[in-house]
Image: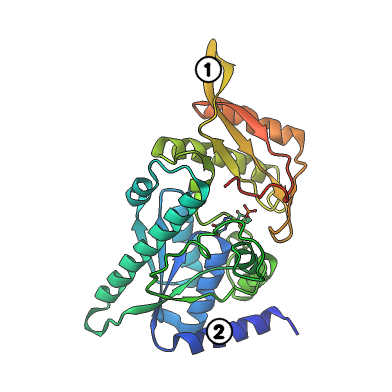
Amino acid sequence: TWTTHNVVEEQVAAIQRQVGDKRVICGLSGGVDSAVAAALVQKAVGDQLTCVFVDHGLLRKGEAEQVEKDFVAATGVRLKVVDAQERFLTALAGRTDPEEKRKIIGREFIRVFEQAASEVVAEAGEHGEAVEFLVQGTLYPDVVESGGGTGTANIKSHHNVGGLPEDLQFQLVEPLRQLFKDEVRKVGEELGLPSEIVWRQPFPGPGLGIRIIGEVNGPRLDLLREADAIAREELTAAGLDRDIWQCPVVLLADVRSVGVQGDGRTYGHPIVLRPVSSEDAMTADWSRLPYDVLARISTRITNEVADVNRVVLDITSKPPGTIEWE
Ligand code: XMP
């Protein structure tokens, strides 16, 4: 029978069999999946694990600090933080195609991990052996939607499934591959992770990179980060965090519309709010948020974020729309 306890026991045993006494690295994204995957691997092989947090510059406000504080405090895991903002922005320059952006981000992630892995070995001194394994927080829906599961069509290359380079030098450890999100949360609770981590809303690995429709660059990221922080703040203040699955905030960077702000005409960009309710992200419905909450978010974003003069609400279910815009 399926119990969270059994899943933990089975996965710990499976990880021990797979990894033996070799070294493992795990990328932490700040999200629940990578956190739970890392905690399982740590339970299985202890300090053979080093976690790597890549700050790719596509994160939301406060996210890097959160990983450094919450997760390390809860687990005592060994953490390496890599500042790779320049690298990702350079690789993404001029790119607008969603699949291309995803593949670039997936590829750069792996390159950064490879470099971090060789540093882990160097830091271990003369007893350092190569890192052979990479942990990924891949869930069952990621497998299915990237076409690797039951043979369904390839919808998107989730960066941790379809977007890996072919010459990957690691073997993958994917202890969540058979689980849905709600099961992952139960496993996280069983492992004693704090509720801020376990109940965090989903956030895609490619981050804000796939929420800027158009080219990704520094100023656009700053703008979107501000808008996203406002939306999250207001949703939290309204007590809606557990009612919605997630609320992507999207910048239509190549679209402009005319507005009137202060004493004059503006020609700015629209921000899209995409609040959804869902059980497992395979299907979703748009959330009927209270109008006053929507109004507060809209007023604050247009007042506080320069170059944004319009906020629109996405009222599409999945299908036909996916949750993310890219
Ligand atoms: P879509 O847009 O496919 O999203 O309806 C379904 C769920 O997956 C998240 N998502 C990702 N998560 N890597 C991830 O770890 C990715 O590349 C990725 N793309 C989408 C999305 O936020 C939603 O929860």
Q: Secondary structure at mark 1?
A: strand
Q: Secondary structure at mark 2?
A: helix
| Foreground residue among 113 and 122 | 113
- Whether the residue carrying mark 1 lies under 8 Å from ligand 1 is answered with no
Q: Position of residue 158 (x, y in %)?
A: 55, 59
Residue under label 1: 266
Quote the CA–CA distance across marks 2 and 1: 57 Å
| Foreground residue among 173 and 63 | 173
Q: Residue at x 54, y 44 (%)?
A: 211
Q: Is residue 323 left or right of residue 303?
A: right
Q: Which residue ends up furthest to the top in the rendered image?
A: 263
Numbered mark located on residue 12 in the image: 2
To which quarter of the image does residue 134 belong?
bottom left
Relative to 141, does residue 295 appear above or below in the rendering? Answer: above
Q: Position of residue 17 (x, y in %)?
A: 50, 89
Q: Position of residue 75 (x, y in %)?
A: 49, 72
The disc labelled 2 sits on which kind of residue? Val
> Quadrant location of ligand 1?
bottom right
Viewer can see residue 65: no
Q: Quadrant of the N terminus?
A: bottom right
Q: How many marks?
A: 2
Q: Is residue 274 left or right of residue 61?
A: right
Give neighbour class at mark 2: few <14, some 14-19, many 20+ (Cα, 10 Å). Answer: some
Viewer can see residue 247: yes
| Foreground residue among 247 and 250 | 250
